[in-house]
Amino acid sequence: MFRLRSCTLLILLFLPTLLKSDESLAVIGAGVQSSEDAPFVQADYRFQPGEFVYTTFQIAGFQVEGGASEEKPRKVSMTYTVTPEDANGVALCPPVTDKIEEELNAEDKNWTPKRRTSFLIPSFVAAGEFKIHIAIRDLIGKAETSKIVPFRIGGVTVLNPGTLNVQNFQFFRRENDRAAVEVPAYSAGDSVFVRFIITGFKVGEKNAYDISYQLLVTRPDGKPYLDRPDAAQLASESFYPAQYLPGEFTLTTSRDSLKGTYIILLTVRDKVADASKEIRFPFTIE
């Protein structure tokens, strides 16, 4: 019985502190926008790689130092950090960090600081769920708080990246077409446009990648039709590790090209991982 009463007393002693937390330091009015000062986007809105994401938030429950007299002006002192992150908490770009140092007048009784930040989505980030992590420190009240604001990125979907691979290999009739052809059949003299993504490659120091690919196209009789041993070289580094790399090439057929099935042999090499991958894709000239 004595132990039970002690536990009950302990809960009651902590109850005022728990109730008081509703009035403590907090991030309020937070959301993401597609442009500066625009309304907050809907939950199903999808930003695209290479676009800016804008964030607006306010801070409440901070402590004020000093009194109302001129000798002791009322002051606030806070710092904040805003970091866009992926689902695993990896930052998409360097965080935005700043201070809030203000002197308040008597009429600023209900003042709440409002801040805006923005960041650029990396070019080669795959579609998925992401978040804005807002962290606040009240230097006067010796308190900290944070808030997570979710947002989505659309664009390229990477399926089971695993090891080095080629995904979304698609044929097009014109260079700027968005819809791929369902059946890759062309006429002699047509141009064949191909786009794909490379996934599952490794990155080194500073998220550096080094990818190359070569092309060999054979005719229906098995003889080479096109041979590009150095079709492309993709090498760079980034703050956030690239989740895919885009590839493309154009093959212009001649009017006297043989009719039948042509085979594209695409060989991708990952210099960082010392790995390679060969993929074959057919198309026909009718």
Image: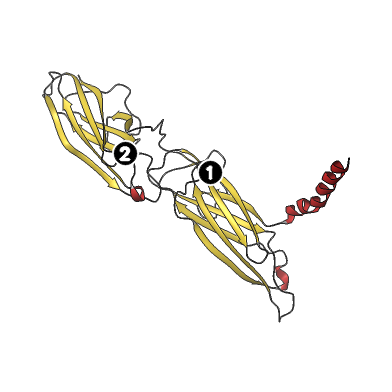
Position in image of residue 46 (x %, y %): 49, 40
**Image-quadrant location for residue 192:** top left
User: Along the polypeptide, which appears first: circle 2 or circle 1?
Assistant: 1
Residue type at mark 2 is: Pro
Q: Tell me if residue 103 comes above or below residue 5 in the rendering.
A: below
Count of labels shown? Answer: 2
Q: With 107 as the anchor, is 138 left or right in this view?
A: left
Q: Secondary structure at mark 1?
A: strand
In three-dimensional space, the C-alpha distance between marks 2 and 1, rounded to whole angstroms, equals 24 Å
Question: Which quadrant of the figure contains the N terminus?
Answer: top right
Q: Is residue 275 visible?
A: yes
Query: Residue farthest to the bottom?
Result: 71
Label 2: how many Cα within 10 Å (few below 14, some 14–19, many 20+): some
Q: With 202 as the anchor, is 119 left or right in this view?
A: right
Position in image of residue 123 (x %, y %): 38, 46
Q: Nearer the viewer, residue 71 or 180?
A: 71
Q: Which mark is residue 151?
A: 1
Q: Residue at x 64, y 58 (%)?
A: 59
Position in image of residue 38 (x %, y %): 54, 52
Query: Residue farthest to the front?
Result: 2
Label 1: how many Cα within 10 Å (few below 14, some 14–19, many 20+): many
Is disc 2 in contact with disc 1, using a CB cutoff of under 8 Å?
no
Q: Residue at x 31, y 26 (%)?
A: 181
Position in image of residue 164 (x %, y %): 32, 33
Q: Secondary structure at mark 2?
A: strand
Residue type at mark 1 is: Phe
Q: Is residue 255 visible?
A: no
Q: Nearer the viewer, residue 135 or 260?
A: 135
Identify the residue under disc 2.
Answer: 246
Q: Nearer the viewer, residue 249 or 201?
A: 201
